[in-house]
Amino acid sequence: MAASRDDANGHEQAPTELNLLTLNCWGLLHISTLRTPRLLEIGRQIAALSPPPHVVCLQECWVQDDYRAIRDAVRDVLPHAKFYHSGAFGGGLAIMSRWPIEESSMVPYPLNGRPTAFWRGDWYVGKGVACATLRIGPGRRDVVEVFNTHTHAPYESGPDDSYLCHRTAQSWEIAKLLRAASQRGRLVLALGDFNMFPCSLPHRIITARSPVRDVWRVLHPHSCIGPADHPDEMARGLPMPTAETAPPNRQNKLRAGKPCPVDPEAEDPNGKRLDYIFASNGDVSDGRGWVVESASVALTERHHSLHVSLSDHFAVYATLKLHTLSTSADVTAAAGEDTSTGFDAQLRASQDFDYDDAGAIPIADYDEILDMTHRYTARERSQRRRRFATFYAALAAWIGCLVAVWFSPRNFVSFLLMLLASLGLTAGVVDGLLALLFFSGEIRRLKEFKWEIQNARAAAVAATGKGGNAEARVAERASLQKHA
């Protein structure tokens, strides 16, 4: 059964299937085209999905009126919901659920953009992870931890991407949350717009540091890992992405016009996966756990009257099923089954996950992260020096203008000197505050991130180079901590 029922004693039974959906709504105030009617239609189409979703995570739902419109449309299907508040303008995250939300929190990312890039807005919205604990049944294991996130946007590309360090650190942070929740024996779900490609470094961090799987790659292991011109994608020599395999797609039409149905098989050289659903198997100690039954692109239909896409992303929809490991007799009978995507194979992979396996991430990946962090720290130190220099230069210019006023022969010259002095001092004070508060804090947060990576790397070196000896791992970490 997909939904819960009441047993003979009136207690709600746990479901055996979970339907999950994630969507980036593109709901920026005053910027997003046709925002209000699009988001209203999003709510209507979510409510009309069959089978109905049990957990929905939304990103870029910035305006509370839009959230309320979606909330009203899905109330009969998803009676419980939470709009999360963060930053100066809000992170645009919301979680909607078939079951009550027992606990909730908004965990900010330590590294999250720069206030100097005000036209991008990532720092001002306070991006982070929206967390919700759902009770889906009366049993000890009937608890689900849901994490919804929208990581920093990739405004740049290649090795010069100055925000790559931020996205990598954000993947590390959410992996820690997923890992901790999984260790409590709970089913863990992470949904959202992760702004990363499959098999990229941030993707590998999440799947290696926590016992979760990218549900799409469980069922579609050969799906695209980037747009057609991406070097890794070109090296595979496989067909181009389509609307069925790449949610952000050129068929996302955002201006009103004539009907234009989405062709799910049309190739798109720019198609790529940025939206993900990660899921663990839950507590498999009794031979039962959650497996991926289906994963697909959803909400591809246009608005019924405006004939526009509902967002600049398509939704990702997945179904998890509670599965019991087959007996030896069952395994013999199903010998011809494709074990790469078989339910038993999924559960056994979870049983093989070792929380103490420090070598899950290759040493080369740790070195890449440390090199990236070193370069970004040097950039921030340089920025801090420049901002302090601007402050002191503005202060000196202000004092010079004040002195010059005494010797000015004309009033309008004095006025210009005072105006320039005031404007210069204002700009200098802003730069001084940025240097003192933001960049100094950023450098300290980078030090924390660097220490965590070095600590994990030391354990990985000990595990891979010394046979995984526990005493060796402790010695490596002690050496690092002594010099921290």
Image (cartoon, grey):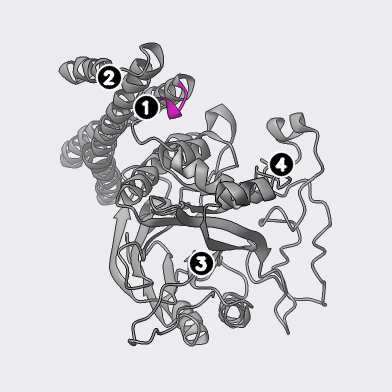
Sequence-earlier tag: 1 or 3: 3
- Work out whether residue 374 or residue 419 is closer to the camera in this orientation and state it: 374
Identify the element where label 4 is drawn.
loop
- For the residues labelled 2 and 3, the Cα–Cα distance comes to 48 Å
- For the residues labelled 4 and 1, the Cα–Cα distance comes to 27 Å
Q: In which quarter of the image is residue 95?
A: bottom left
Please state, as top left, top right, bottom left or bottom right, where the C terminus lies in the image: top left
Give the residues drawn in magenta, as a range.
Answer: 358-362
Q: Which amino acid does label 2 sit on?
A: Arg
Identify the element where label 1 is drawn.
helix
- Provide the residue designation for mark 2: 473
- Circles 1, 2 touching at the beta carbon (< 8 Å): yes
- Which of the two discs, 1 and 3, sits closer to the camera? 1
- Which of the two discs, 2 and 3, sits closer to the camera? 2
Q: Identify which residue is drawn at 76% across, 61% down.
A: 251
Q: Residue 119: x percent and y percent?
A: 47, 53
Q: Which amino acid does label 4 sit on?
A: His
Left/right placement of residue 291 relative to residue 189 reads right
Numbered circle sitting on residue 304: none
- Work out whether residue 169 or residue 444 is closer to the camera in this orientation and state it: 169
Q: Residue 412: x percent and y percent?
A: 29, 51
- Provide the residue designation for mark 1: 358
Sequence-earlier tag: 4 or 2: 4
Sequence-earlier tag: 2 or 3: 3
- Provide the residue designation for mark 4: 222
Q: Identify which residue is drawn at 38% across, 44% down.
A: 114
Sequence-earlier tag: 3 or 4: 3
Q: What secondary structure is the stretch in magenta mostly built from?
A: helix
Is residue 334 within the magenta segment?
Answer: no
- For the residues labelled 4 and 2, the Cα–Cα distance comes to 36 Å
Q: Residue 372: x percent and y percent?
A: 44, 26
Q: Residue 80: x percent and y percent?
A: 39, 79
